[in-house]
Amino acid sequence: MKTSYVTRFSYAATDVAGQLVFCWVTWYAAYFYSDVCKIPAATVGTILLLARWLDALDAPIWGLIFDKTTQPVGQIPSLVSVAFRTICHIRGVNVFNARA
């Protein structure tokens, strides 16, 4: 089955947008940790590198979990989704409440 050019472009556009958002978030995290929290730049770089490695290792595992899950409302279990959003919210609040 061949996909249309519009479909291909939409996939490419969302991928580019995701990468742009990732670049901005990573840049801001590096700025925040190094300039606001006064963590050395080498340590910040190491933390961000380790986070990318961890993400590369656990993404296929999450993909398998989501592919094997079947629910009437969709493949992503609602409990996992709510837990993930809660953890991200708590981490985000804690980062911005850090004392310099």
Image: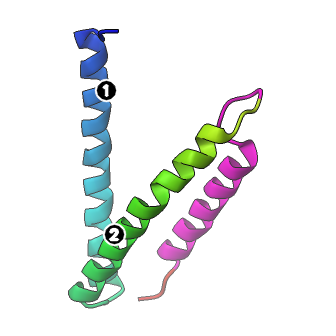
Q: As shown in the figure, which amino acid type bears the numbered disc 2?
A: Ala
For the point 24% across and 38% down, the residue is: 16
Foreground pick, 48 / 24: 48
Where are the magenta residues, as a range?
72-97
Q: Secondary structure at mark 2?
A: helix
Q: Is residue 7 above or below residue 31?
A: above
> Magenta stretch: residue 73 in it?
yes
Q: How is the image coloured?
A: rainbow
Q: Answer with left or right where residue 80 lies relative to residue 67.
A: right
The image quarter in which residue 55 lies:
bottom left
* Mark 2 in CB contact with mark 1 (< 8 angstroms): no
Decide which of tag 2 and tag 1 comes sooner along the chain: 1
Disc tally is 2
Disc number for residue 82: none
Disc number for residue 11: 1
- Residue 32 image point, x, y percent: 33, 75
Q: As shown in the figure, which amino acid type bears the numbered disc 1?
A: Tyr
Quadrant where the N terminus sits is top left
For the point 22% across and 85% down, the residue is: 41
Foreground pick, 20 / 62: 62
Q: Which residue is mark 2?
A: 29
- Residue 70 image point, x, y percent: 72, 33
Q: Residues within 10 Å of mark 2 (few under 14, many from 20)?
A: some
The image quarter in which residue 46 lies:
bottom left
Q: Is residue 98 above or below residue 9?
A: below
